[in-house]
Image (spheres, grey):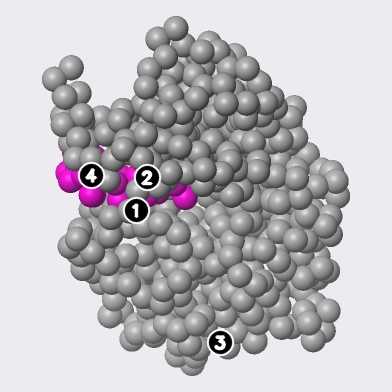
Amino acid sequence: MSQILSKVRTADELAMLVQDGMTIGVSAFGLAGWNEEMARAIGKRFQETGHPKDITFVQSSHVGDHTENKGTAFLAQEGLIKRWIGAHLLGSPKMARLVAENKIEAYNLPQGVIIELWREIAAKRPGLITKVGLKTFVDPRVEGAKLNARTKEDIVKVINFEGEEWLFYKSFPVDIALIRGTTADENGNLTMEHEGILTCALPLAQAAKNSGGIVIAQVENIAKANTLHPKDVRVPGILVDYIVVATSQETHYQTEATYYNPAFAGNIKVPLSEVPPLPLDERKIIERRAAMELIPHAVLNLGVGIPSDIAKVAAEENVIDLLVLTTEAGSIGGIPASIPHFGHAYNTECLLEEQSQFDFYDGGGIDITCLGLAQTDKHGNVNVTQFGSKIVGCGGFINVSQNAKKVIFCGTFTAGGLKIAIEDGKLRIVQEGKHQKFLDHVEHISFSGEYASELNKPVMYITERAVFTLENGEMTLVEIAPGIDLKKDILAHMGFQPKISSNLKEMPSGIFRPKWGELRQIILEKMKG
């Protein structure tokens, strides 16, 4: 019997291999790398038979497209999933609902921790020892990464090693690994020429095989054995047990909204003119002010939302050549894309597998990161993870914010209906947001101001009307926008009294005008220093 007949199966056939109580690990980022065929088949089997049940489902990043039509939507069924362990839930509304309604156990671990844990499992090491997560909600002295009352077991421990405090994340066996590529040859070797993100398919496949588990890969094409270039193979056939071929474009999306864009795959370079300029609004003010903190040849990471569009400001201001933009998904160079393509990048110079990118990140390789600001408090803590019953998840936020040399949090001053006007270089609040974001205490500690202060890490909090820094563990107001009243527009909408710098300045007026054009000179001036 030929190798192709022994490895290629339908998703329905392969779904029968998933037994009750198994642990399924997946390698995906949005819909990149996501084995949609197997997810649909497993969900369909459960609906028809009630099996498999009591599954532990482990995802290293967010999975889905923020709808109930793709991603984990087919697996998010009460009874099918017993325990969810992952980095992010925002892209998976049905799974998030199961967690919020206390119907499944749920642990939110940092993205890089899960990805690096696959390698510990593959090598049969006891687990991952890292400082990532200390003094955040992941720390067992805070919440232990638990997202609801149903979740009882402690899976994260604090240990003392060589006189230093660390977190220990214990290894566990992986029974089923669901991965994806573009092409598989008859021996099961996988290439990823159309993927825009390489994900962590290799270490996950190694973890499953060395756990005695099964690796199932989804692909679009089958090639003759021994015809793939060996340097193109990202996962060797010795790790792949079965192959399922995508039945349509709908089950093999490259990003959350695109079947295939050759630019994201690195197969073409696009003119930067194709990246349209942003409108002048509160977001662009924040992005421009954050961009002023950039330094020549800095290695940058930009988070989702407002931070990701700093790349567009950099392109508009013609400074991309002075920077090195990266994403936790593995891109180095180029311009990171925004939602719904977040994680991908235009004109990237290099694309790494996620585990390699997080090794670099965790070791302090990022010079500056710009991340989202959902909630913050008087101690400089930041919450981007959970808001009442709304569960988002930390993603790579903890890895990045804890280990970057400088952290800049970017967000509007209030949320929910904020409207502004910009008139003659001055800012006016037309309608205040309904929700305060500067609180006495955040609901969830995704970033620890205390830990950052211990490390003497430079931290900034940039909004459309004010800029704050973390000084000796205390939130300090250092800049105010032209046209803004300190008491009426800032202090009246804060849950605490910040320290006000004795050298309080006005935010640069240029960033409040339709045409700016000053960023390149600002960055180049720093070279002289």
Q: In the image, residue 509 lies at what x, y percent?
A: 30, 30
Region in magenta? 305-327
- Residue at 58%, 65% (x, y): give it: 66
Marks 3,2: beta carbons within 8 A: no
Answer with mark 4 or mark 1, whichever residue precedes in sequence.
1
Relative to 337, is 525 above or below? Answer: above
Q: Which amino acid does label 3 sit on?
A: Arg
Q: How many marks?
A: 4
The local crowd at label 1, few if under 14, some if 14 to 19, many if 20 or more residues have their Cα within 10 Å, is few
Q: How far apart are marks 4 and 1 (CA)?
A: 11 Å
Is 82 included in the stretch rendered in magenta?
A: no
Left or right of 105 in this view: 355: left
> Which numbered disc, 1 or 3, marks the residue closer to the eye?
1
Q: Name the residue under label 2.
A: 284
Q: Quick one: 361 or 212, which is closer to the camera?
A: 361
Marks 1,2: beta carbons within 8 A: yes
Answer with mark 1 or mark 3, whichever residue precedes in sequence.
3
Q: Which amino acid does label 2 sit on?
A: Lys
Indicate the secondary structure of the residue bearing disc 2.
helix
Indicate the secondary structure of the residue bearing disc 1.
loop
Q: Distance between the residues labelled 1 and 3?
A: 50 Å
Q: Which amino acid does label 1 sit on?
A: Pro
